[in-house]
Image: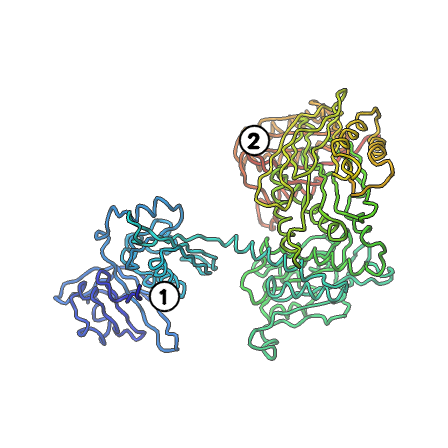
Amino acid sequence: MSPVNPFDDAATARVVVDDSGTLREWNEGARLLLGHLAGEVVGTPAADLLDGRHDGPPTPENGRWHGTLALRHRDGHTVSVWVLAHHRTAADGAPGSWLAVAPPAPAAAPQDDPLIRAALTQSPCAVMVFDDRLLLRGVNDAMARLLGLPRDRLHGLRATDINSRPQNMELERLLRRVLATGRRQDLRSHLKAEGEERAHAWVALMAPLTDADGLVRGVCVSAHDFTEQHLARERLQLVNEASVRVGSTLDVNRTAEELADVCVPALADFVSVDLLDPRDTGGEPATVVEPPVGLRRTAHRTHLPDHSAGSAHSSTCPPAAAETGRLDFYPAGSPQAECLLSGRAIVAAEAHGDLERWMGWDPARLRQVREHGVHSVMSVPLQARGTTLGVAVFIRFRRLHPFTHDDVLLAEEVSARAAVCIDNARRYSREREATLTLQRSLLPRWLPPTAAVQAASRYLPAARSGVGGDWFDVIPLSGMRVAMVVGDVVGHGIAASATMGRLRTAVRTLADIDLTPEELLTHLDDLVVRLSEESGDDRAGEVGATCLYAVYDPVSRRCAMARAGHPAPVLVPPDDPARQVELPSGPPLGVGGLPFESAELELREGSVLALYTDGLVESRDRDPDAGLALLREALAAPGDSLDAACDRVLHSLLPAGSAGDDVALLLARTRGLPTGQVATWDIPADPSLVAPVRKQVLDQLAVWGLADASFTVELVVSELVTNAIRYGSPPIRLRLIHDATTLICEVSDSSHTAPHLRRARTWDEGGRGLLLVAQLTQRWGSRHTTEGKTIWAELGLVEEE
């Protein structure tokens, strides 16, 4: 199809006016509209066409204007015309021009166009329809809002009539290709829609519209905002890049430089890495961090302008406040000291008014911040294996937008990976038998005591093939619940151990947000797929794993579990024979794209659940079914001690004391909370009824003999119930659960909006509720349910002597 001349169409009036206001082009549509021949008006002031009673069009803003103008017809009468005009910049630096278009009157548009009807009924998003002359036949409301133009005024316009941006020109080029080839096209771009302050990532999908004979009669264009997916992809790309580039050597300085290199300019314009000075601790970081904190500058990186690294550096890039190798002491109140003391990232932004407060401890640095336009600073502690190593500082001065919550999470993730690499380098010359040490450090050293289960575990490394990737964990959850997990990474050696560490960390993180077993395995499967893609060197597909994840609730005494290619657990109910739980197998982790299913069963109090890896029941000399029979027999033997049961299982199945594969075994004996330790109230959505609820709670505490905790519990219950009434949705339910050491307050409602902790300013009337709850309790959080959400807070009880 030959290129279309935009001035060939007679249905739409089009004129070009240069920046001096002189008419330069006049098409047939303009002649039909106003009667003037091109030779009569080209070269004359465009203002001569305005009706004498008209003050002229308003001054265009943002390079585009649209509105109704009163224009003078050749025969003298006035014509009221809706006009869309946008400025076009000349590529060669010549003066620009304005393209003004007047589409046909809305009444001229077909009222029952099959193309429009097909597009609007088949697409749920922002849609526009072009005919085979590349003229707009119609748009839906979503597209009209996106364009910022009246829907009924767009009929007959071209893509380049709407705007002269390069994206519109590329769109028109691709539309011609769709018409010529009949194949779909898509256009991805970054641009600001009308009324937006920052550009979004958009994708325009173009599909041919055909008639009954299969001939292409038009093109349907649907626009999708995929900013979140684009940003997520960029964040994932940075994490992947950090995984590859950071830690390429066992050198501390080089690893710190790699962290700075990865994050500039992808995340920040300036990054510095300062590590705690070992001082006189034998080369190890100080176990206790106290201000003033001594930090030695290990690496820094600045985003230099593309055109120069000389004089422009001093005018546009802030110089490093400390030279590499220099030791500085940071007092209490500085961002570096505060993030190390709190163990969390701290962000200071000029827009929030806290940048000068955070930087006020050092007038010289504050002066640099002001001179170079620094508007956002983020300090992230470098922590690995329970050790604080230093701090990474991220600064923005070229990017216009401050750090967001997602940026903080990304910086923490990258910094955490870098911290592990730095710690590995620091330990390298001192550690012997690195693989075994790594495996031991990644496995839990002790199982946390919980009210839900009594647990015992064993781990036995393979005798010949080396340490592998078997792991287990017991994770306390909210509401007295507990998660139990056993997994097995394919392969042996340090790679398998490192993968196991990633998966165990991911499981703990996903468990903390209270995902269901099948949802957790789905996310874990995605992680293993990404790890496989990262392996490289023709080793793609080597990373794989199996996993079993179970969640037990001692209040309902029900256990939900799901597995990914892992052996099903063995259940030993009280006074009943041991049996293997019937559980959907699920695909191994790393296959990708296949669903996982969970099963739920009721466990009587005192039931023993055995989770294990296949190295326990499988061997070269024994069939897996025979190994499973031995396991059931060993578990069914009488005995009250779970530690003794673990030893008996290993002795029965591995009499030689060694295994050909790693073995992980986790035994858990279930406990149930008596109904007398749980109290539930349905709360009316009436703030005036909070006081009676507090009274009922205090009465219940008195019944439980927990009067000493009344003051704290009353405040926590009051805040959580008031928040649920004010911001949640009924029905609202309050539940108290307690055991010998813990009291849990839970407030549930049907709203899916999660609360967040914020710092209230002095003059704010609210915003301190969750902060008060956080200060009064050991921990608090929220979890989503099928009915809504639950906010919970956990208080420690002091045992009476």
689 lies above or below 351: above
Residue 144 visible somewhere in the drawing = no
Q: Is residue 147 left or right of residue 26?
A: right
x and y percentages locating residue 800 in the rendered image: 82, 30
The image's mark for residue 732 is 2
Where, by quadrant of the figure, is residue 253 drawn? bottom right
Observer-nearest residue: 86 or 544? 544
Q: Earlier in the sequence, mark 1 or mark 2?
A: 1
x and y percentages locating residue 595 in the rendered image: 58, 39
| Label 1: element kind | loop
Q: State the residue lying farthest toward the left.
A: 75
Q: In the image, what residue type sits under mark 2?
A: Ile
Badge 1: how crowded within 10 Å, few (<14), some, or many (20+)? some
Badge 2: how crowded within 10 Å, few (<14), some, or many (20+)? many
The image's mark for residue 164 is 1
Observer-nearest residue: 198 or 496? 496
x and y percentages locating residue 688 in the rendered image: 55, 31
Q: Quadrant of the C terminus?
A: top right
Where, by quadrant of the figure, is residue 445 drawn? top right
Q: In the image, what residue type sits under mark 1?
A: Ser
Q: State the residue lying farthest toward the front.
A: 621
643 lies above or below 88: above
Where, by quadrant of the figure, is residue 668 drawn? top right
Q: Quadrant of the N terminus?
A: bottom left
The image's mark for residue 437 is none
111 lies above or below 702: below
Residue 582 visible somewhere in the drawing = yes
Observer-nearest residue: 203 or 382? 203
